[in-house]
Amino acid sequence: MLGANGKIPDFGCKTMTSPSVPVSPSRPWQTRLLIVTLSGAAVSVALGVYGRFHDPAGQQTVTVFFGSTLAFKAWMATVVVTLALVQLLTALRIWAKFSWPKTMPSWFGQVHRLSGTLAFLASLPVAYHCLWAIGFEPDLTQTRRFAHSLLGCLFYGAFLVKIFAVRSHKLPGWVLPVIGGTVFTTLVALWLTSSLWFFTTVGFPGF
């Protein structure tokens, strides 16, 4: 029935509304970062445990045209560090930390991603030989080998954290540079305790 004004009267009833549904608060960035960091730590520990308790084969694996697997590892690690340096420099330009080249090419982003992917892939045969043929060095008196073992495990854990951080858009801006810097620093330390040692002790170029 229409009222005098031509509208349907509400007869004093209140407007019906749907019951409010509680919205769960988004996970704080500290929790996200903790989960990501623990995931990377789990990878590092798993690699270390495998390398420690796996019975090392003590055999040469990949040599390609090199005289030994150690020579192959030394040069592949050098390639990895070079590619990582390319990724670092392109990242600094993308984030405007320096202005060269003055006009950033459109393909800079692709070079940044490709160099990181290639660096990771090139590191895999090196890591395979370290874990399968040599194993984790637990003797603290073997300073170089012990440090190299720790750094190798840390590198892959930190790399996983970096991958998660790149894909997460809810972390503070300082997280990715810190993690990226950790990955690069660890990689350089790995090179110093392996490739540099090989070139200065065994011989250069070592073919």
Image (cartoon, helix red, strand yellow):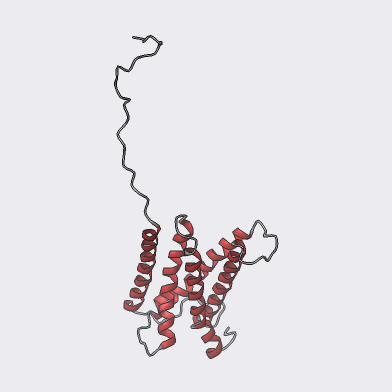
Q: Residue at x 51, y 79 (%)?
A: 191
Q: Quadrant of the C terminus?
A: bottom right
In the rendered image of this protein, does residue 20 appear above or below residue 205? above
Q: Residue at x 62, y 64 (%)?
A: 93
* Number of numbered discs overlaid on the protein picture: 0
Whether residue 91 sits left or right of residue 175 in the image: it is: right
Q: Nearer the viewer, residue 146 or 18?
A: 18
Q: Nearer the viewer, residue 5 or 201?
A: 5
Q: Residue at x 45, y 72 (%)?
A: 155
Q: Nearer the viewer, residue 187 or 69?
A: 187
Residue 120 placement (x, y as % from top left)? 50, 67
Q: In the picture, residue 160 is in which quadrant?
A: bottom left
Q: Quadrant of the N terminus?
A: top left
In the rendered image of this protein, does residue 42 appear above or below residue 16? below
In the rendered image of this protein, does residue 50 appear above or below residue 11? below
Whether residue 169 sits left or right of residue 55 in the image: it is: right
Q: In the picture, residue 132 is in which quadrant?
A: bottom left
Whether residue 50 sits left or right of residue 204 in the image: it is: left
Q: Nearer the viewer, residue 84 or 167?
A: 167
